[in-house]
Image (spheres, rainbow, N blue to C red):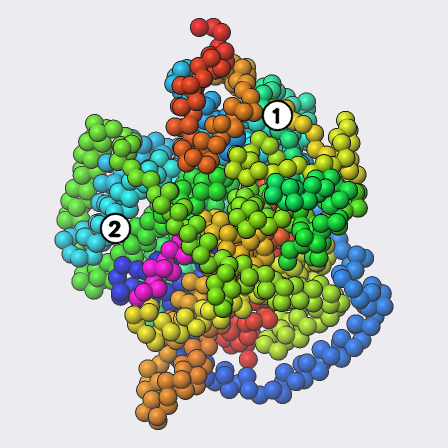
Amino acid sequence: MNTRRIRTTLVAGASALGMTVLSACGAAETNISASDGIVTIAIPSWVGAEANAAIAKHILEKELDIRTKIIQMDEPVAWDALSTGKVDAILEDWGGVPKKEKLYIEEKKTVVPGGDLGVVGHIGWFVPKYFADEHPDVTHWKNLNKYADELRTTESDGKGQILEGSPSYTTHDDAIIKNLGLNLKTVYAGSEAAQITQIRKYVKNKEPFLSYWWTPQWLNAEVEMVEVELPPYTEGCDADPEKVACAYPELPLQKFLNAGFAEKGGEAAEFIKNLHWSTEQQNEVAKWIASDGMSSERAAEKWVKENRDTWEKWLPKGD
Amino acid sequence: MTAVAPTPSAASKAQEPQRTQKTPKKQAGSVEADQRGKPPSSPGVLRRLTDRADGVSIGWRLLALVAVAAVAIPVAASLWGSGSWPSALTYDVRAPLERLDAWIVDNRESHWVFLYFLLHISNNTQYAVDGVFAFLDGLGWVGVTVAAVVVAWYAGGANLGRRALRTAATALGTFAVIGLLGMWEPAMDTLALMIVAVAASAALGAVLGLLSGVSDRCEKLLRPVFDTMQVMPAFAYLLPFVLLFGVGVPSALIATVIYAAPPMARLTALGLREADPAVLEASASLGSNPWQRLWTARLPLARKQMLLGLNQTIMMSLSMVVLASVIGAGGLGDAVFKALARVDVGQALAPGIAIVLIAVWLDRTTAAAGARLDDTSSSGPVSRARAWAGRAGALAAVAVAAAVGSVVGRDWPVNWTVSISAPINTAVTWVTERIDAGLPLVGGTLVWSENFARWVLNPLRDGLQGAPWWLLLLAVAALALLTGTWRTALTATAALAAIGVMGLWSGSLDTLSQVLAALVLTLALGFAVGVLAARVAWVERAIRPVLDVMQTMPQFIYLIPVVALFNASRTAAIIAAVVYALPAVIRITTQGVRQIDPGALESARSMGASPLQQLRQVQLPLARPALLLAVNQGVVLVLAIVVIGGMVGGGALGYDIVYGLQKSELDVGLTAGVAIVCLGVVLDRITQPAAARRPGGR
C-alpha cells in the first residue's frame, strides 16, 4: 500500500505538471527558424554542393555582411527543412524527390523555385578508361553481358557487379538491368565515401569495374572514366520507375528557396536567385577542396578573389 | 546505436571494479536479475551448473516438441509449401505506415496534436539549446575552459589532493586539444546539445527509475520498453522523429533522450531495490512514513548507483548526439560527416579525437564525483559554510575568466590550430597498402575478405535462405527449448515468425548470417583476449586505452579504412561490427574471470592443477554468468551496428534502414528496425539459459 501511494502521488503530480505546462500556453509557433537573421543553406554530402555553398557564404558574409550557416543533410530531409523554414535555400537539387517537390511547391506553397544553378548534372554507368581501352566494345550496353564474368565479385551472386553509391541517390538501375535483360546485379556500397574508396582501390590495382557514377564529380579529375552507352533518353521514358529502360537525362541543377525567405529575405534572397556559374567553375573549386586539401573557406576566398567578373553580376541591383 | 555505453577507465582504482561490473547490468535486462542476486562465485552458480546436467526434463520437452512438430509441419508444408516464407502468411505493414507518413506531412502545421503539444516540445528544446549555446558563446573560450576545469576540480574533491588535480588537468587538456585541432566551434555546438540532452535524460530516467524502483508492476511494464529502446537501431527511430518534430536540434534531442534515459532509469531502480533492508527497518521503526523513508533512506542509499547511471547516460548521449548529425543537428558529428564526404580520414579524425576527449573528460569527472561520495560518507559531513565558500570561489573564478575571455576574443585564436589531416591520411594509406594484398604466406586482407565471403558467408546465407521456413522455426524452437523453457521457445519462434509476416524473410536471413559470423568472431577474439588480460596484468593495462578509444570513437571514422582493406562487402560490415562489439566482450570477460572466488582457484592450485587446467576447470566454469553476459552484449552490439554495415556494403536490413532515413521512407526504415529487434530477441532467447533470466525459475 505504501509503494502504491507513492506511485499514485508521483503519477498525479507528473500529469498535473504536464497539464499546467500545456494549458499555460496556446498554439505553438509552427515555423521557428533556428536562428533569425542568419541565412541557412543545406548541402547534400558531395563536394560540388559544398563548393556552391562555400562561395555563396563567402560573398554573403564578406560583401553583403549577412551571416550564413551551412548544414549538411540528405536531399529528402533538406526538402522538409526547406518547407518548415529551418533551411532557407538549397543550391543544387538533382530532382531526386519529385513527390515532395510537388507537395511543397504546388500544394503547400512553402517552397519556391530559385532558377538554374548553371551546372548541368548527369548520372550514368561508367567504366574506367584502362578497361575501355582494352575492350572498346564495353562502352555499349549490348556488350555488357559479355563482360559479366570479369565484373563478378563475392557480393554479386555470380552475376556482374555494378557498384552503387549512397541509398539517398536517385537510381533506376535495378529496373534498367531487368528491362534490358542484363546479367548484372546492383551492389550498394552504402555511402559515397565507401564507393569512392572502392573505386580508388580498383584503380590502384587496375581491376575492371562498372559503377553508377555522375558528373560533375571531383574524383573525375583524378580517375578517368568512360560512360557506357545506354538506350537514349527520351522525354518520359523514366515516368514509370518499374519500366525504365533508358539512360539518365542531362539535368540542369536547380536552386530552391523557402517561400518566406524568398519574399522577405531581401538582399540575401536576391543574391541566391542570381547565383549562376558553370560546371567547369564548380569543378575547379571542388577539386581544390577535395583533392588539394584546401578548406572550403580558403577555396572560396581564392575563387572569389580571382573571379570578380563572374560574381559581381549576382549582387543585388539595389546598391 | 551503441547499446553499451562507452566506458573509459575510471580515474580511481577503487571505482573501477565496481563500475565495470555494474556497467553491463543496465543493458542486459535479461541477465540483470541473476547478477544482482548472485555474484559469480556464489554456490548458486555451481548448483545451477549441476542442475543443467540432468537431461531428463530436457529430453521430455524435446520429445513433446517433436510431437507437436510432427502434427503441425506436414499441415503447414502442404498448405503453404516448403520454400521461403509463404506469401500467404505475410501481412502488409507498409501501407498503413505510408498512410501515417502522409498524414503527418499533411497535418504537421494544422492538427491540434502538433499545435498544442508536439510543437511546444520542439520549440522549447530549440530555445533551451540556443540558450545554452549563447551562454557558452558568451563565456568565450577562456571562460568555458576555466569553467570546465573548475567543475572537474570541484567534482574531484575541491582540494589539492591528487584526484582533484588530475581531474582538473584532464579537463584542461581536453579543451586545449579541442582548440588546437580547430574544433572549438563544433565542439561548443555539441556541448550545448549534450548539456540539455543529459539534463532531460537524467530527469526522465530518474522519474522512470523511481517508478520501477518502488513498484513491481511498473518494473514489469517498463523493462521490455527499455530493452527495445536499446536494441532498436537509432537510425530507425530518427526518421519518425524527423517527421514529428522536423529536422535539426529537436529531433536529435528527443532521440538522444530516448536512447540515453534507460541506463539512468535502470540503475536508479536497482539502487532503490538494493537498499539495505536493515536501514529501512530501522527507519520504519523510528516511525517514518513511506515518503520519508523514500527521501531520507532509500534515495540517499541509491545515490551511488544513480551517479553511475548518470555517467552511462552522459556517454550514451555523446554517441547519439554525434549520430544525430545525419538529421542536421550540427556540431562535431557534422564535421565528421563533411570530412567523410571528401573521403578524408585525417580530417574526420580531428572531430573524432575531440569526441573521445570529451567522453574521457566527462567520464573522469563523474567518476571522481562517485569516488568522492565514498570518502564523504566515511569522513562525516563537511561544514556548510565551507562548502558554500568553495562554490562562491568557483563561480567567481568562472566570472573572471569570462571577463578575460571577452577581452581576448570569444573564438579560439585561428593561428593556434594545427592540421593533422595530411600526415594521418598518408599513414592510413601507407598501412592499408602494405597489408591489403601480397603479403607472403598469409595473403592479405583483400584475399581474406574474398575467401571469407566465398567459404563462410555465402554458404551460411544460402543455407539459411534455402532452408524451408518451417525448418528454421523448428530449429529456433528446439534451440531455445534446449537452453530455456516453453515460454522462451515460444517467444523466440514468434519473433522469427514476425519477421516473415512483415515480408522481410530473405533480407533478415542475409543479415542473420552476417550477424552470426560477426558474433562468432567477436566472441572467439573477445574471450581469448579477455582471459589473457585477466591473467596477465600488463596486457590489461596495455589494452585499456585502446578499448576506450574503440568504444568512444564515432564508428563512421573507420568506414573508409575498412573498405580500403576489405572492399565494399559484407566482410567489411562484419569487421566493423567486430571492432565495435569487441571492447565490451573483452571487458566483461576479464572482469568475470578475475572476480571468481580466489579460494576455489587456490585449492585447485594446491591440488597441483596446471595453469591450463585451472583455466578450463575452475576459472571458466565459475565465470559462466559473466561469459553469458558477454554473449548477450555481443548480440546487442553486433545488431546495433548492422546499420553501419549497411554503409560499407553489408546490404540487407542495414541498408534498408539507411535507405529509409535518407529517402525519408518511414515504412522501409521502421520495419527493418523492428526486424532487427526481432533478430535480437531470437538470438537472446537461444543463447541465454532460462535460469539466467529468472533466478527462482526452477
**Residue B596 place in picture, x, y as percent:** 37, 78
Q: Farthest residue to the top: give it.
A: A318
**Chain ID, mark 2:** B
Q: Label 2: which residue?
A: B170
For residue A104, what is the image quadrant?
top right
**Residue B238 place in picture, x, y as percent:** 55, 44
- Span shown in magenta: B541-553
Q: Vertical placement of B487 versus A74: above or below? A: below
Whether residue B519 is in magenta: the answer is no
Q: Label 1: which residue?
A: A120
**Residue at 77% across, 26% down:** A235
Q: Is residue B641 visible?
A: yes
**Residue at 33% across, 69% down:** B539
Q: Farthest residue to the right: give it.
A: B78
**Chain ID, mark 1:** A
Whether residue B551 is in magenta: the answer is yes
Q: Magenta span: helix, strand or loop, mainly?
A: helix
Asked if labels 1 and 2 touch by Cβ distance under 8 angstroms, the answer is no
Q: Nearer the viewer, mark 2 or mark 1?
A: 1
- The one nearer the camera, B676 or B69, is B676
Q: Is residue B206 left or right of residue B485?
A: left
Q: Residues within 10 Å of mark 2 (few under 14, many from 20)?
A: many
All told, the count of numbered labels is 2
Disc 1 residue type?
Answer: Val
**Residue at 50% across, 45% down:** B255
